Amino acid sequence: MKFKKVIYPIVLITWMIVIFLFSNQNAIKSQSTSDQVASKIIDTVTTVLKQPITKKQKNNLIEDTRILVRKTAHFTLYFILGIFMYLTLDSYSIPKPLLYGILFCFLYAISDEIHQLFLAGRTAKIVDILIDTTGASIGNFLIYKIKK
């Protein structure tokens, strides 16, 4: 199917650019993005539960959940990358798309963390590479199982 051979790589590359753009944020912008996500989650939960909280309580919750939001973002971004990677490799009938998909995502996660070393206030963390690779592996494996 020629359509898949064109669309899947375009979607894959677009998603890799999305990951790159998130990684390209300096530390202040990156934290601000995470805090905005946490704030929206807190607002939604307090609205659904009908439990109003003070601004101070909300700020404390944002600080307390920041690491969880950031690590969940890592996992989710790479989970989706894993899905797109497998679909792209499989559409080209690459042998062992599961293995190569996970390997490529792992290498991309490493390059992503190295890239962050060159940004103000950012660091490279092995734990992030592990989270990224875990997300990508599960994404790859999920699509592999669905297609089998």
Image (cartoon, grey):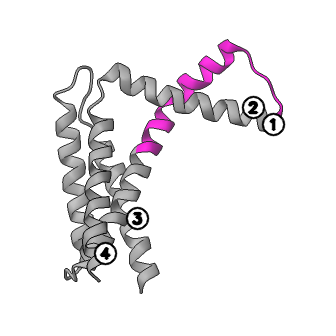
Q: Locate residue 79: give its quadrant.
A: bottom left
Q: CA distance from mark 4 to mark 1?
A: 44 Å
User: Do the residues under discs 2 and 3 have CB atoms within 8 angstroms?
Assistant: no
Give neighbour class at mark 2: few <14, some 14-19, many 20+ (Cα, 10 Å).
Answer: some
User: Do the residues under discs 4 and 2 have CB atoms within 8 angstroms?
Assistant: no
Q: Amino acid at mark 1?
A: Leu
- Residue beneath disc 3: 139
Pointer 2 or 3: first along the chain: 2
Q: Which mark is residue 49?
A: 1
Q: CA distance from mark 1 to mark 2?
A: 5 Å
Q: CA distance from mark 2 to mark 3?
A: 31 Å
**Marker count (numbered):** 4
Give neighbour class at mark 4: few <14, some 14-19, many 20+ (Cα, 10 Å).
Answer: some
* 26 vs 109: above or below: above
- The residues colored magenta run 49-73
- Residue beneath disc 4: 4
Residue lying farthest to the top in this orientation: 56
* 95 vs 13: above or below: below
In the image, what residue occupies the spot 50% across and 26% down? 35
Q: CA distance from mark 3 to mark 1?
A: 32 Å
Question: Under tag 1, what secondary structure?
Answer: helix
